[in-house]
Image (cartoon, coloured by chain):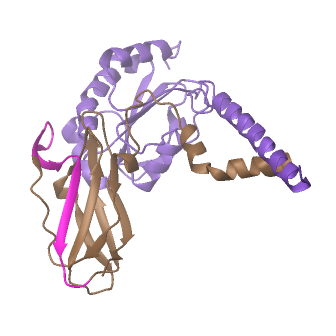
């Protein structure tokens, strides 16, 4: 009985880790899962500014023109145009010269009151390896008054 | 030593033993012969072609099927496609069938596939493609993703990212059906 209880404790302690350890071995192990390639940080509102940031893994990039921020709640909330940094130029064989973000995308958008929920879209690639499908995340804004 | 202390020690010892068993099980499961390796039968996959007609992978049973998941917004996919067309031309008569599966909007593929000169069958979808990729072993959700299925319906290779030409030729040569399909 005690053995069973201990085994259950063990398996319940780290189910996520066990899952990741048993991920398929792929012929291209350097390719990251999308949530590791692009890590959306908690969205914060403080001092009348909305902070949105995405950490971008080395070798990966996000397309500037694929990034969108919209307010889900409250309805009718006027966010205004979210100004993105210029990013850097990237010569793409098929899409020509495009602007991309590497390492980190950090946006500070001035807005007097915090929205409650946002929908954030982004899309990017691992340089010369793969591209990830467009990502959509719905997040609750943490208001630090 | 009090009875309660003995019980705590016993529980701790059992936890340690269970951890050892768990680690051993993980080491076993993480070996190359575990479920993550190609070698299983490909599941039946049904996707629409560009006319909206449902097609099944089993439609090409008896051939060596290279299912290439791609998208019009995926630069490495677009870079790889001319080589896949070459392979179809070179090995089609010996039983290779390349099948493109696009994670995209139908209209984008209707325009994009002819522009790229794709001659092999192209299937298209959104969540259906994601489901098909997962059913064929994908856990990254990244493109391009290619799965090679032999004439008996067995998955013989899976790959994220572009093939090297020599690598793909070797794979195809090793797995072509003996009678040409």
- Left or right of B140? Residue B37 is right
Query: Looking at this view, is A141 or A28 the one in front?
Result: A141
Q: Which chain is brown?
A: A
Residue B13: image quadrant is: top right
Is residue B54 visible in the rendered image? The answer is: no
Q: In percent of the image, x 31 and y 86: which residue is there?
A: A75
| Percent of width and height locating residue A13 | 65, 52
- Measured along the vertical axis of the image, is residue B40 above or below residue A88? above
| Percent of width and height locating residue A77 | 25, 85
Residue A29: image quadrant is: top left
- Measured along the vertical axis of the image, is residue A131 above or below residue A138? above
Q: In percent of the image, x 23 and y 39: which residue is there?
A: B75
Q: Which chain is purple?
A: B
Q: In percent of the image, x 28 and y 81: which residue is there?
A: A114
Q: Which residues are magenta?
A: A89-113
Q: Is residue A96 magenta?
A: yes
Query: Looking at this view, is A32 or B25 the one in front?
Result: B25
| Percent of width and height locating residue A73 | 34, 82
Q: In percent of the image, x 53 and y 12: which residue is there?
A: B178
Residue situated furthest right in the rendering: B3
- Measured along the vertical axis of the image, is residue B150 above or below residue A83? above
Query: Looking at this view, is B156 or A14 the one in front?
Result: A14
| Percent of width and height locating residue B121 | 37, 37
Q: Is residue B97 magenta?
A: no
- Measured along the vertical axis of the image, is residue A130 above or below residue A140? above
Query: Looking at this view, is B173 or A136 the one in front?
Result: A136
């Amino acid at each position: 009985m005690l053995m069973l209880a201990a085994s259950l404790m063990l398996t319940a302690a780290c189910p996520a880790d066990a899952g990741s350890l048993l991920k398929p071995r792929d012929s291209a192990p350097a390719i990251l899962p999308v949530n590791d390639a692009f890590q959306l940080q908690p969205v914060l509102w403080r001092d009348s500014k909305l902070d949105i940031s995405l950490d971008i893994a080395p070798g990966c990039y996000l397309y500037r023109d694929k990034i969108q921020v919209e307010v889900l709640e409250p309805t009718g909330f006027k966010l205004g145009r979210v100004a993105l940094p210029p990013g850097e130029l990237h010569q793409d064989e098929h899409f020509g010269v495009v602007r991309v973000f590497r390492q980190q995308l950090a946006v500070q958008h001035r807005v007097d009151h915090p929205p409650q929920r946002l929908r954030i879209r982004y899309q990017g690639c691992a340089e010369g390896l793969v591209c990830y499908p467009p990502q959509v995340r719905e997040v609750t804004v943490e208001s630090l008054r | 030593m009090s009875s309660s202390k003995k019980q705590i020690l016993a529980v701790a010892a059992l936890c340690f033993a269970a951890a050892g068993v768990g680690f051993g099980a993980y080491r076993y499961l993480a070996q190359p012969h575990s479920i993550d390796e190609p070698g299983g039968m490909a599941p039946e996959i049904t996707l629409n072609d560009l006319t909206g007609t449902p097609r099944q992978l089993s439609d090409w049973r008896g051939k060596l099927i290279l299912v290439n998941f791609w998208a019009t917004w995926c630069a490495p996919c677009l870079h790889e496609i001319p080589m896949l067309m070459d392979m179809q031309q070179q090995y089609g008569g010996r039983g290779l069938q390349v099948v493109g599966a696009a994670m995209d909007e139908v209209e984008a593929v209707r325009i994009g596939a002819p522009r790229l000169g794709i001659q092999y069958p192209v299937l298209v979808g959104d969540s259906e493609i994601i489901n098909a990729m997962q059913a064929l072993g994908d856990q990254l959700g990244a493109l391009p993703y290619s799965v090679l299925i032999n004439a008996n319906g067995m998955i013989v290779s899976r790959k994220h990212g572009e093939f090297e030409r020599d690598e793909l030729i070797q794979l195809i040569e090793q797995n072509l059906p003996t009678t040409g399909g």
